């Protein structure tokens, strides 16, 4: 059975306090260049004990702002940086801007022939540790750090405003699911908005119909990031004999078959 509806507003909220973090010189240089991760062993001091999802502000040796992000006391990646260079409030308004910017960068991807694509690509879109894939009207979020859970309600509201999906699903990485801070209800995934999906969520890729199975498959149900490679295989497959090893959904096979393999 698919997971039941889960209300993200019941999750722990982040503390209003800000953690002051200082790091080693190599980490300072990495953050200045835009690196999204602060590792535990690069931290020299934290102002106080922080909970998962608390906002951490990283300063350099001269007490100048370097970055701010989400704190995860259980992970070797202790801070996922969301803001670099200039201070900004980490809140729903910021998440909405980042998601809107990401959608703008992908405006030419969706079409009548391709109805599934990655909406949000983690650190590449300024939201380190969180990805989102859209399969027609079904949005699937995947959290790679427990630090996103206290901010999940704000993220969901931002997506609802910008995309109005029929349903929003949540997956959490294994390390998150097995941590003490993750509710057991989320271990197998959750429905955050709308009705639970049918067994498979249908979508089109370059005119070919596939099904994603978010609660049973790899990643969010399909390797959307391989779309260009599947197209290339299809374009080069005429009169070829093609062996698809570890085929998973068979996406490369279907493209090859249409290409004349």
Image (cartoon, rainbow, N blue to C red):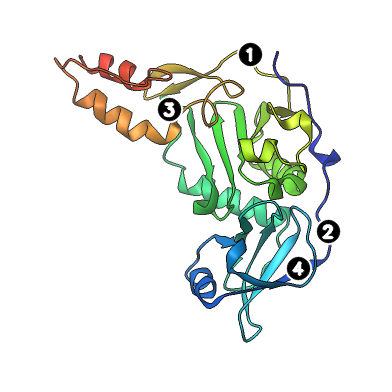
- Separation of marks 3 and 1 at Cα, in angstroms: 20 Å
Which label was assigned to residue 198?
Answer: 1
Q: What is the crowding at mark 3: few (fewer than 14 residues within 10 Å), some, or many (at least 20)? A: some
Residues 25 and 88: in front is 25
* Residue located 62% across and 87% down the image: 62
* Residue located 43% across and 27% down the image: 114
Camera-near label (1 vs 2) is 2
Q: Position of residue 14 (x, y in %)?
A: 80, 54
Residues 161 and 21: in front is 21
- Separation of marks 2 and 4 at Cα, in angstroms: 10 Å
* Residue located 20% across and 14% down the image: 260
**Residue 163 occupies quadrant:** top right
Residue behind mark 2? 15
Label 2: element kind:
loop
Q: What is the crowding at mark 2: few (fewer than 14 residues within 10 Å), some, or many (at least 20)? A: some
**167 over 131 or under it: above or below:** above
Could you tell which of marks 1 and 2 lies nearer the N-terminus? 2
Could you tell which of marks 3 and 1 lies nearer the N-terminus? 3
Which label was assigned to residue 114?
Answer: 3
């Amino acid at each position: 059975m698919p997971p039941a509806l889960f209300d993200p507003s019941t999750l722990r909220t982040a503390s209003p306090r800000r953690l002051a973090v200082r790091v080693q010189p190599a980490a300072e240089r990495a953050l200045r260049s835009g690196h999204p991760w602060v590792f535990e062993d690069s931290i020299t001091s934290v102002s106080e004990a922080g909970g998962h999802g608390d906002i951490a502000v990283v300063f350099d040796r001269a007490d100048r702002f370097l970055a701010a992000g989400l704190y995860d006391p259980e992970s070797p990646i202790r801070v996922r940086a969301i803001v670099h260079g200039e201070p900004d409030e980490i809140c729903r308004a910021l998440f909405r801007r980042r998601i809107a910017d990401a959608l703008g960068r992908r405006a030419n991807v969706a079409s009548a022939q391709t109805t599934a694509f990655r909406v949000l690509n983690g650190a590449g879109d300024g939201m380190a540790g969180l990805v989102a894939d859209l399969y027609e009207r079904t949005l699937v979020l995947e959290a790679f750090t427990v630090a996103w859970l206290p901010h999940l309600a704000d993220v969901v509201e931002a997506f609802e405003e910008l995309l109005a999906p029929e349903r929003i699903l949540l997956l959490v990485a294994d390390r998150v699911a097995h941590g003490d801070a993750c509710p057991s209800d989320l271990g197998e995934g959750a429905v955050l908005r709308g009705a639970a999906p049918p067994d498979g969520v249908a979508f089109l890729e370059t005119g070919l119909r596939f099904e994603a199975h978010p609660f049973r498959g790899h990643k969010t149900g399909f390797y959307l990031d391989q779309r260009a490679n599947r197209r290339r295989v299809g374009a080069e497959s005429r009169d070829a004999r093609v062996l698809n090893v570890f085929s998973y959904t068979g996406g490369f096979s279907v493209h090859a078959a249409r290409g004349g393999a």
